[in-house]
Image (cartoon, rainbow, N blue to C red):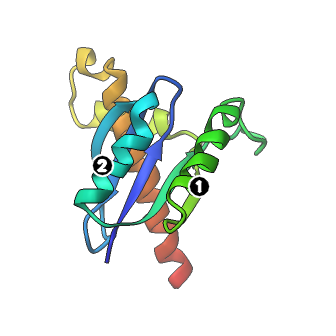
Amino acid sequence: MGRIMGIDYGRKRTGVAVTDRLQIIAGNLATVPTHTLLQFIKDYMQREPVERIVIGQPSQLNGQPSESMKYITPFVNRLRKELPDVPVVMYDERFTSAIAHQTMIDGGMKKSDRRDKARVDAIAATIILNDYLQSRLNQQK
């Protein structure tokens, strides 16, 4: 069984998370410069099997696509073209950055560490992926 990769795509930085091999829990992997993301994914996939990629789909409170979709959609299309055997799934990411910040506070992280946007991106990717895993479990019930 391959891992599932979660992505919190950003214009400058992108948070990346992966599941364990049994696809039970997600953990953050890295935050990478977005312009290197595709190569990062390919390099990772040479070391570890990835069964699916879940990309956070930003939307507004009213459910309409967020402005940032104009940057994400071309990347998703390129990813699907370059890795045609790996399903790419878009998953609602509303409030993940806010949840990531709250998680950092609840975990007792210092204020200076909470300002580290790369850390927030990695945590947000983990939250997206864990939410996706939970939704799959709920669908099986």
The mark tally for this picture is 2
Q: Residue at x 30, y 33 (%)?
A: 104
Q: Residue 135: x and y, percent?
A: 52, 68
Q: Residue at x 51, y 84 (%)?
A: 140
Q: Residue 11: x and y, percent?
A: 53, 26
Q: Residue at x 39, y 38 (%)?
A: 15
Q: Residue 83: x and y, percent?
A: 50, 59
Residue 60, relative to residue 126: is it above or below? above
Q: Which mark is residue 43?
A: 2
Residue at image mark 1? 81
Residue 113, relative to residue 97: is it above or below? above
Residue 124 visible in image: no
Q: Residue at x 43, y 55 (%)?
A: 129
Q: Label 1: how many residues lie within 10 Å, few (<14), some (14-19) or many (20+)? A: few
Q: Residue 47: x and y, percent?
A: 22, 58
Q: Give how far apart the Cα atoms at labels 2 and 1 are.
A: 16 Å
Residue 67, relative to residue 39: is it above or below? above
- Asked if residue 45 lies left or right of residue 53, the reply is left
- Asked if residue 40 lies left or right of residue 20, the reply is right
